[in-house]
Image (cartoon, grey):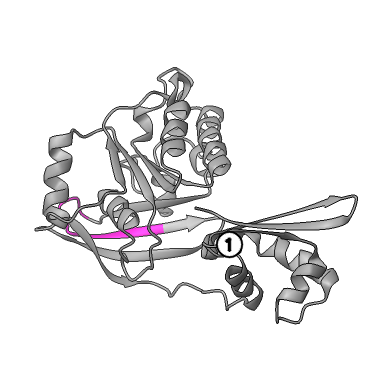
Amino acid sequence: MAQLAYHVSTGTPMWNFEVKPATVLYLALEDDYARLQSRFYRMFGTDSADNLHFSTVANSVNGGLENQLRGFIEAHKDTKLIIIDTLQKVREESKETYSYANDYQIIARLKSFAGAYGICLMLVHHTRKQQADDKFDMISGTNGLLGAADGAFVLHKEKRTANAAILEISGRDQQDQKLYLTRNQEKLTWELDRAETDLWKEPPEPLLEEIAKIVTVESPLWEGSPTDLAKLITTEIPVNSLTKRLNVNAGRLLNEYGVEYRSCRDHDGRKLKFQRRA
């Protein structure tokens, strides 16, 4: 988690994956600041990460956690990643803690919060000691945890003392993947040996590229009708198909180009709005 947090906060590529820089909040709830400082020094030396923020304490989910996170996001508008390490530290203990309904409810609640602010909320959770053919069945608790989440990563070793590990990835909006990693004992970082399969990449979408040229840092807002937009772009798309194509690619426009798209209808007809996020 420390390695991931650092790379996102600095925009440094990780395991051959491109990284977009953003502010990161790392709730290291099983650590103290001395241990964090020592670990980061071994991992990255004296290189600074001004967009990486830490806390070793946090309220519980029902005790004000969302208000704390909301306050941080409002103070750091470019926040894109919040890591809660671990989930157990922010959930309440009760006899219903490990029921399917309780597990599903807590993840759904945090997922709703993340969606409202357009961030990635990563929850660290322990695995069971028992082995399983499907490694995702090793996640401690009920299936409610994985059922409510958008995706999951499971890091496991064949032997506890081994330096080699496998990171298995699964989710709704991502390709299933298996990464083979080796731990650098000197730096305490995980290094990529190989990926089991190459990730599929979507082909370029000329329409999105043209919109990104229109909605720039200098001119972050554009509003108009589909006809107005059709006059500005060189991609030949029928006006009556333009909105449908944008609806399908709205998530990609935001993720790849940082441009938020909205469509509405008023007395003058259909209106499109594009806004570049800060």
Residue 167 in magenta stretch: yes
Task: Please tell me which residue is depicted at 51% across the width and 74% down the height of the picture.
Answer: 200
Q: Position of residue 227 (x, y in %)?
A: 82, 69
In the picture provided, is 92 more to the left or to the right than 247? left
Above-or-below relation of 49 to 69: below
Secondary element type, mark 1: loop
What kind of residue is marked 1?
Ser
Front-most of residues 189 and 196: 189
Q: Residue at x 44, y 31 (%)?
A: 71
Farthest right residue in view? 267
Query: Could you say where residue 192 lies in the image, as x and y percent from the top left?
Result: 27, 67
Residue 172 place in picture, x, y as percent: 56, 55
Query: Does the magenta run of residues contain 229?
Result: no
Magenta residues (range) = 159-168
Give the image quarter of residue 141.
top left
Q: Nearer the viewer, residue 38 or 105?
A: 38
Q: Residue furthest front?
A: 218
* Within-10-Å neighbours for mark 1: few <14, some 14–19, many 20+: few
Q: Is residue 61 above or below residue 144?
A: above
Residue drawn at the location 59% of the way across and 63% of the way down = 252
Q: Which residue is the site of mark 1?
A: 219
